[in-house]
Amino acid sequence: MAATGACVFHGSLFSPLRRHRTSSIGTFKSAPIAIPNAPRLAVSTTSMDRVASSSLPETTSTSSVTDLFGNARFDKTYENATTAIVGVGGAENGTRFNSEVRWSLKDYFEQSVELIRSDSGPPRWFSPLESGSRMDNSPLLLFLPGIDGVGLGLIKHHERLGKIFDVWCLHIPVRDRTPFTELLKLVEKTVKDEHRHSPKKPIYLAGESLGACLALSVAARNPHIDIVLILSNPATSFSKSPLQPVITLLEFMPESLQVSLPYILNLPKGDTSRLPLASVGDILQRIVGELSQDLAALSTHLSVLADILPVETLIWKLKMLKSASADSNSRLHAVKAQTLILCSGRDQLLPSMEEGERLRQFLPKCEIRRFSINGHFLFLEDGLDLAATIRGASFYRRSQHLDYVSDFIPPSPAEFRKIFEDFRFVNFATSPVLFSTLEDGKIVRGLAGIPEEGPVLLVGYHMLLGLELAPMVGQFFEEKNIILRGMAHPMMFIKTKEGRLPDLASYDSFRMMGAVPVTAKNFYKLLSSKAHVLLYPGGMREALHRKGEEYKLFWPEQSEFIRMAARFGAKIVPFGVVGEDDISEVRFPFPHNLPFHFWLLLCYILFWKTNFICHQMVFDYEDQMKIPLFKKQIEELTSEAVRLRADMNGEVANQDVHFPGILPKLPGRFYYYFGKPFETKGRKEELRDRENAHKLYLQVKGEVENCLAYLTNKREDDPYRHLWPRLAYQAKHGFTSEIPTFEI
């Protein structure tokens, strides 16, 4: 998260149902789903006509659009009014969802039983009431299920997705035998109808396995419609699946042979007299095993799976997988949609990792996110927050083009904790201490001197590799409930081609926390929305400085941000950061009264879990450019990144991308000092003059240098500057205690 630079280290319904739908295509007939015990689903009715939003109770929210997108604070807690439960004959029960419920695999099976019991009729859409608290102008997300066809595959994500999407799920009844081509027409008609209704909004198709093939084919047939694809373990690789060979065996099974799923699963493994059934049993065991690795839960789920996938339905679905895979593969060349592929590393049913890479070669706007420890049914497993994944990959938008400012959804407290879990050892190792300046000039520990209301522009120094970012952003979040919107190098959002640069997934957490590509347009929008903007004028040149250049500013000669800040009356807060250059020498006697293995464990945590927080530069840009092999690598890296400041000359012109050669050191302490804000309110006309703007620019730069000098001098008086004294203090007072520092 760096302005014109880079952070090169990587971490790791208003109403419950506004529109009732049932599509009528070919042999499809309109019919409601009969749902015993009224599960929490708003089901399509007998009409394709839109129903006014007043037909069901509205949900209310304590958070307005201004709150969410203006000052970029925490996502407020949604307090839903009584929501309707729609069942047989339109009966309604009052239910209140005041907090996010943690759904589990057990809930999937229980609600599946309720949904498919006495189920009949054609495929249709339903909207889960747990998805009933969406923001205004939310895009439509159509979920296309996998081999199960129930449509509850997103049950663990309904509530979070419902805050930002209008969620519809496709339900395919167990006894339904609609072929793939007719399912394709059903989804396509829905997409076309919604596009006619809202032509400027994207339509999201989220499909898993079979549903992913369906989504690809719909997108290929409708390249003129703005479709965004979210594909989980797509079955386009079905020809390489262990499921595929069993189709031939299943075709030889007599139709009159009535067997139950539990019977097949309990067939003796070596019984060759029942070879087709044994093969089916092996496949079903794979499916159940993918759904649950818990052996105790496995037996509980068998009877439910027998209802969802009776043998004859399984045979039909496997044959459909084959035709779906062939159809979508034949259309890949016509897919123009923006695509996000989610691949599981432990998928036992499909070679999903390899298939993701293959599909990326065909799809022009494709990105991949990998989940190495997950299986085939990714949406039902732990370790995935689909709403957060979509936002982190910059795939969430509410219009034809992504707006990094207005489309930004601030992270919830739970999302914040998850993001910074990866950086907890950074805070532990560096014990960051932050100072700010009050209006009267008094320096205080903490962020009391930072203005609460924006717009605020924080301008400062970029440490080596941008290591100061995580502790600073985290502290602003925790202490002030403020999200710093960092102006970042475009290479964190786009690569001109695949190559040596880190995968874009490496920067998902920074995008989740509000980073935007550095452009004048984005800068303007952030200030106009009264955000707290983080800007590094030295950019990549400072973040990748050379040997002996610690705490040296590399700012453009001409001012770049003063007049824009004055236009909106922004307060400019200069700041400095020091610490990554600290030497590894130990200035504290080794505490022999603690066990040696205690210190050994701490060293392991500090060096391996923090990815070597502090470094010593040993092989910089100048050294690498002298060696042809490294020079060639730098040229390749630079060619992959978007060029910045290409019209400038000198130190801050477009920088070559490189990775400096560094050696790890014992982590020094990080110190942050935020100076007294510069007021620009009421100075708009004055600062339009280039000379006046340049004078203020130099004053801000000088104050950043003063902040650096202050910290460099004062840290000498900090008895806890080095690692061992801090560890000893925390061993005595607790590892969550605040470590003292120098006197202010």
Image (cartoon, rainbow, N blue to C red):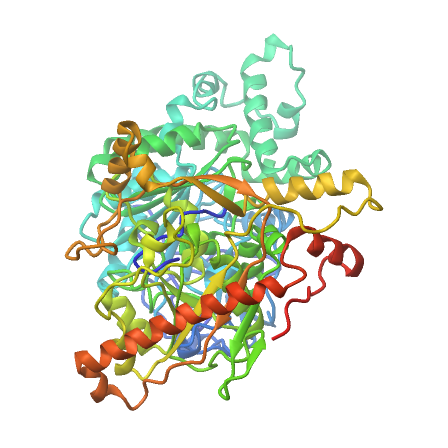
- 106 and 370: which is toward the camera: 370
Residue lying at the far top of the rendered structure: 272
* Residue 277 is at least partly visible in this image: yes
Q: Is residue 190 above or below residue 483?
A: above
Residue under the point 48% across and 87% down: 439
* Residue 130 is at least partly visible in this image: no
Residue lying at the far right of the rendered structure: 593
Q: How many marks overall? A: 0
Residue 651, position as x, y percentages in the image: 25, 54
The quarter of the rendered structure image containing the N terminus is bottom left
Residue 645, position as x, y percentages in the image: 20, 57
- 599 and 251: which is toward the camera: 599
Can you tell which quarter of the image residue 444 is in?
bottom right
Can you tell which quarter of the image residue 184 is in?
top left
Q: Is residue 733 above or below residue 429?
A: below
Left or right: residue 737 compared with residue 44: right
Residue under the point 55% across and 36% down: 373
- 4 and 146: which is toward the camera: 4
Residue 324, position as x, y percentages in the image: 34, 33
The quarter of the rendered structure image containing the C terminus is bottom right
Residue 706, position as x, y percentages in the image: 43, 71
Residue lying at the far left of the rendered structure: 647
Residue under the point 57% across and 72% down: 479
Left or right: residue 140 compared with residue 667: left
